[in-house]
Image (cartoon, grey):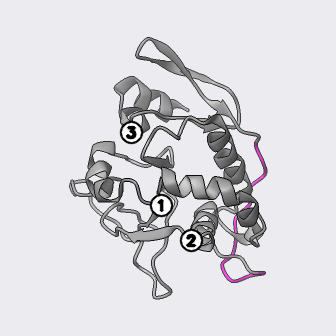
Amino acid sequence: EDLIRSQLAKGVSVFACNDFAIIASRRVVLGRMGGKSVETWLNPEHHVGTGKYGVNGQKTDSFLNTETFLLAWDTLVKSGKLWPFDFVVKIDPDAVFFPARLRAHIKDHVGRAVYFANCGKWPSGPKLYGSVEVVSVPALRMYNRSVDECKQLPWRGWGEDYYLQQCMDHIGVEQAQDFDQVGDDRCIAAPCSNRAKAA
């Protein structure tokens, strides 16, 4: 919570975007921006365990947090707040995120139904890694029409980023590959001095 308050006070990370929503397990007033109160949107909390890749169909060694994010995407889509924009970016609160840099990465994809695979480390193919998830609004319109199909996927052993990628692929959203978008120790790290990375 302190990290988010600090980002808000400095107008950085998600608070440097055209708009934002902070979804959390409790409603908290974070501060003020532009003369308005900024508070979290309430999303019910669920117990989240960790997976063990390859055991019982699990696809991650990280958090099995798909259900939490299904509810978060539902909350955001139903709010209608995303529709005026070109892209929605889901950011982990501890990601060091530079929206201006991201704009340079995604500008050629405006108007297309697309999501970005940001990790090219694995022989099994490009992956969407969850510290930064970039999805176009046309892709989220497709998601909104097909969300029930996606919720029928066998997501219980998945992390939320794997779910989102499987869902996008399932409903026919184009995958754009941008392995220079994010430096992440879980994929390929980058030094903080790398100004090409958006996070």
Residue 68 visible at all: yes
Question: Which quadrant does the N terminus fall into?
Answer: top right
Question: Which secondary structure, mark 2?
Answer: loop
In the displayed structure, 169 sits above or below 131; it is below
Question: Is 51 left or right of 125, judged from the image as shown?
Answer: right
Q: Nearer the viewer, residue 182 or 126?
A: 126
Q: At x 58% / y 52%, what residue is drawn?
A: 141
Mark 3 and mark 2 in contact (Cβ < 8 Å)? no
* In front: label 2 or label 3: 2
Q: Which mark is residue 172?
A: 2
Disc 1, SS: loop
The quarter holding residue 161 reads bottom right
Residue 169: give x, y in percent of width and height. 57, 72
Vertical placement of residue 178 versus 143, above or below: below
Q: Nearer the viewer, residue 105 or 112?
A: 112
Distance between the alpha carbons at the discs numbered 1 and 3: 24 Å
Crowding near pointer 1: few (<14 within 10 Å), some, many (20+)? many
The magenta stretch is 45-56
Circle 3 sits on which residue?
Answer: 13
In space, the residues marked 2 and 3 are separated at their CA atoms by: 30 Å
- Indicate which disc, 2 or 3, sits on the residue closer to the N terminus: 3
Mark 1 highlights which residue?
113
Question: Would you say the residues marked 1 and 2 are in contact, meaning their CB atoms lie under 8 Å apart?
Answer: yes
